[in-house]
Image (spheres, rainbow, N blue to C red):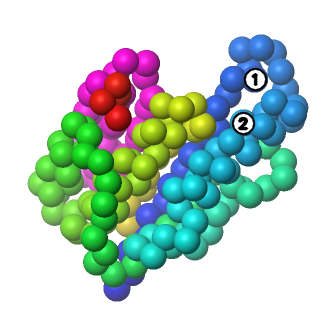
Amino acid sequence: MEHQLTLGVYRRLDNRPLGISDDSEMALELHNKRKDALLDVFENKEHLQVKDWGETKDTKPHEFTELVIGIVGTAVFNYAIVPGLKYLGEKLAEKLVDDAITNSVKWIIAKLRPKQKSKEILNFQITLPDGTSIYAYPIEGNSSITIHFKDGNIETIQYDSQNL
Protein backbone atom coordinates (compact mmCIF):
# COMPACT_ATOMS: atom_id res chain seq x y z
CA MET A 1 0.00 0.00 0.00
CA GLU A 2 1.32 3.43 -0.91
CA HIS A 3 1.19 6.16 1.70
CA GLN A 4 0.97 9.82 0.76
CA LEU A 5 2.33 12.86 2.53
CA THR A 6 1.51 16.49 1.89
CA LEU A 7 4.45 18.88 1.97
CA GLY A 8 3.82 22.61 2.16
CA VAL A 9 6.78 24.92 1.56
CA TYR A 10 7.01 28.70 1.90
CA ARG A 11 9.31 30.72 -0.29
CA ARG A 12 11.58 33.28 1.32
CA LEU A 13 9.76 36.56 1.92
CA ASP A 14 12.81 38.82 1.69
CA ASN A 15 10.92 41.22 -0.58
CA ARG A 16 8.41 42.23 2.10
CA PRO A 17 10.67 44.07 4.58
CA LEU A 18 11.92 46.08 1.60
CA GLY A 19 8.38 47.07 0.65
CA ILE A 20 8.64 45.17 -2.64
CA SER A 21 5.47 43.60 -4.05
CA ASP A 22 4.75 39.87 -4.01
CA ASP A 23 4.32 40.16 -7.80
CA SER A 24 7.80 41.62 -8.30
CA GLU A 25 10.87 40.20 -10.02
CA MET A 26 12.41 39.67 -6.58
CA ALA A 27 9.41 37.60 -5.46
CA LEU A 28 9.69 35.57 -8.67
CA GLU A 29 13.40 34.99 -8.03
CA LEU A 30 12.58 33.75 -4.51
CA HIS A 31 9.79 31.54 -5.93
CA ASN A 32 12.23 30.07 -8.47
CA LYS A 33 14.87 29.54 -5.79
CA ARG A 34 12.34 27.42 -3.87
CA LYS A 35 11.38 25.59 -7.08
CA ASP A 36 15.02 24.72 -7.78
CA ALA A 37 15.52 23.54 -4.19
CA LEU A 38 12.46 21.27 -4.35
CA LEU A 39 13.41 19.88 -7.75
CA ASP A 40 16.89 19.16 -6.41
CA VAL A 41 15.47 17.22 -3.47
CA PHE A 42 12.54 15.38 -5.08
CA GLU A 43 13.00 15.06 -8.83
CA ASN A 44 13.69 11.51 -10.05
CA LYS A 45 13.70 9.86 -6.63
CA GLU A 46 12.71 6.20 -6.58
CA HIS A 47 11.55 6.00 -2.96
CA LEU A 48 9.45 9.19 -2.98
CA GLN A 49 7.40 10.26 -5.98
CA VAL A 50 5.83 13.69 -6.26
CA LYS A 51 2.26 13.09 -7.42
CA ASP A 52 1.38 16.79 -7.54
CA TRP A 53 3.87 19.69 -7.57
CA GLY A 54 1.17 22.25 -6.71
CA GLU A 55 2.29 25.75 -7.74
CA THR A 56 5.99 24.89 -7.48
CA LYS A 57 6.64 25.16 -11.21
CA ASP A 58 4.29 28.07 -11.92
CA THR A 59 5.72 31.04 -13.81
CA LYS A 60 4.16 33.47 -11.30
CA PRO A 61 5.45 33.87 -7.74
CA HIS A 62 3.55 32.16 -4.93
CA GLU A 63 4.21 32.50 -1.21
CA PHE A 64 3.29 28.86 -0.55
CA THR A 65 3.17 25.66 -2.54
CA GLU A 66 1.89 22.25 -1.58
CA LEU A 67 3.22 18.97 -2.94
CA VAL A 68 1.62 15.53 -2.69
CA ILE A 69 4.31 12.91 -2.22
CA GLY A 70 3.84 9.16 -2.53
CA ILE A 71 6.02 6.80 -0.50
CA VAL A 72 7.04 3.92 -2.74
CA GLY A 73 7.64 0.59 -1.00
CA THR A 74 9.99 0.20 1.92
CA ALA A 75 13.03 1.94 0.51
CA VAL A 76 16.22 2.40 2.49
CA PHE A 77 16.87 6.08 3.07
CA ASN A 78 20.34 7.55 3.28
CA TYR A 79 20.67 10.91 4.99
CA ALA A 80 22.75 12.70 7.56
CA ILE A 81 21.40 12.27 11.06
CA VAL A 82 20.88 15.56 12.84
CA PRO A 83 19.98 15.79 16.53
CA GLY A 84 16.32 16.68 16.02
CA LEU A 85 15.65 13.72 13.73
CA LYS A 86 16.40 11.07 16.33
CA TYR A 87 13.98 12.67 18.78
CA LEU A 88 11.39 13.12 16.03
CA GLY A 89 11.65 9.43 15.15
CA GLU A 90 11.17 8.46 18.80
CA LYS A 91 8.09 10.67 19.15
CA LEU A 92 6.52 9.30 15.95
CA ALA A 93 7.26 5.73 17.10
CA GLU A 94 5.49 6.44 20.41
CA LYS A 95 2.36 7.29 18.40
CA LEU A 96 2.78 4.11 16.30
CA VAL A 97 3.41 5.96 13.05
CA ASP A 98 4.36 3.53 10.27
CA ASP A 99 8.14 3.07 9.82
CA ALA A 100 7.99 3.92 6.09
CA ILE A 101 6.25 7.20 6.91
CA THR A 102 8.64 8.01 9.77
CA ASN A 103 11.72 7.31 7.65
CA SER A 104 10.31 9.36 4.76
CA VAL A 105 9.62 12.32 7.06
CA LYS A 106 13.12 12.13 8.54
CA TRP A 107 14.64 11.98 5.04
CA ILE A 108 12.58 14.98 3.86
CA ILE A 109 13.61 17.05 6.87
CA ALA A 110 17.27 16.04 6.50
CA LYS A 111 17.17 17.15 2.85
CA LEU A 112 15.18 20.37 3.34
CA ARG A 113 16.98 21.70 6.44
CA PRO A 114 20.13 22.57 4.43
CA LYS A 115 17.85 24.33 1.92
CA GLN A 116 16.54 26.45 4.80
CA LYS A 117 20.04 27.13 6.03
CA SER A 118 21.15 28.28 2.57
CA LYS A 119 18.04 30.51 2.40
CA GLU A 120 16.48 28.73 -0.58
CA ILE A 121 13.22 28.04 1.30
CA LEU A 122 11.53 29.31 4.44
CA ASN A 123 9.24 27.22 6.68
CA PHE A 124 7.87 23.87 5.63
CA GLN A 125 5.28 21.49 6.97
CA ILE A 126 4.59 17.82 6.41
CA THR A 127 1.12 16.36 6.92
CA LEU A 128 0.92 12.62 7.51
CA PRO A 129 -1.95 10.39 6.33
CA ASP A 130 -3.42 10.34 9.87
CA GLY A 131 -3.55 14.15 10.05
CA THR A 132 -0.43 14.62 12.19
CA SER A 133 1.48 17.72 11.05
CA ILE A 134 5.17 18.48 11.43
CA TYR A 135 6.41 22.07 11.11
CA ALA A 136 10.06 22.98 10.54
CA TYR A 137 11.15 26.54 11.26
CA PRO A 138 14.54 28.06 10.47
CA ILE A 139 15.78 30.07 13.41
CA GLU A 140 19.28 31.57 13.40
CA GLY A 141 21.43 29.49 15.75
CA ASN A 142 18.63 27.17 16.84
CA SER A 143 16.03 25.47 14.70
CA SER A 144 12.76 23.94 15.75
CA ILE A 145 10.48 21.15 14.67
CA THR A 146 6.96 21.16 16.08
CA ILE A 147 4.73 18.09 15.85
CA HIS A 148 0.95 18.49 16.09
CA PHE A 149 -0.31 14.95 16.67
CA LYS A 150 -3.78 13.90 15.57
CA ASP A 151 -4.75 13.41 19.25
CA GLY A 152 -4.10 17.10 19.97
CA ASN A 153 -0.73 16.69 21.70
CA ILE A 154 2.07 19.01 20.61
CA GLU A 155 5.81 18.37 20.89
CA THR A 156 8.54 20.87 20.00
CA ILE A 157 12.13 19.93 19.32
CA GLN A 158 14.77 22.65 19.35
CA TYR A 159 18.34 21.99 18.31
CA ASP A 160 21.46 23.74 17.11
CA SER A 161 21.00 24.29 13.38
CA GLN A 162 24.73 24.83 12.95
CA ASN A 163 25.10 21.03 13.08
CA LEU A 164 23.37 20.54 9.74
Q: Position of residue 34 (x, y in %)?
A: 64, 44
In this rendering, would 2 be left or right of 76? Answer: right
The secondary structure type at the circle numbered 1 is loop
Between residue 34 and residue 101, name the one nearer to us: 34
Label 2: how many residues lie within 10 Å, few (<14), some (14-19) or many (20+)?
many
Which numbered disc covers residue 15?
A: 1
Task: Residue type at mark 1: give it.
Answer: Asn
Q: Which residue is mark 2?
A: 30
User: In the displayed structure, would residue 148 be above or below residue 12?
Assistant: below
Q: Position of residue 4 (x, y in %)?
A: 43, 71
Q: Which label's residue is closer to the chain start, 2 or 1? A: 1
Is 156 inside the magenta-drawn segment? yes
Q: Position of residue 94 (x, y in %)?
A: 12, 54
Which stretch is magenta?
133-160
Label 1: how many residues lie within 10 Å, few (<14), some (14-19) or many (20+)?
some
**CB atoms of marks 2 and 1 within 8 Å:** yes
Asked where in the image residue 108 lies, by quadrant, the reply is bottom left
Residue 27 shows in this picture: yes
User: In the displayed structure, would residue 25 be above or below residue 57?
Assistant: above
Q: Main secondary structure of the magenta part?
A: strand
In this rendering, would 142 be left or right of 63? Answer: left
Task: Residue type at mark 2: give it.
Answer: Leu
Q: Position of residue 85 (x, y in %)?
A: 25, 45
The residue at the point 43 percent across, 49 percent down is 111
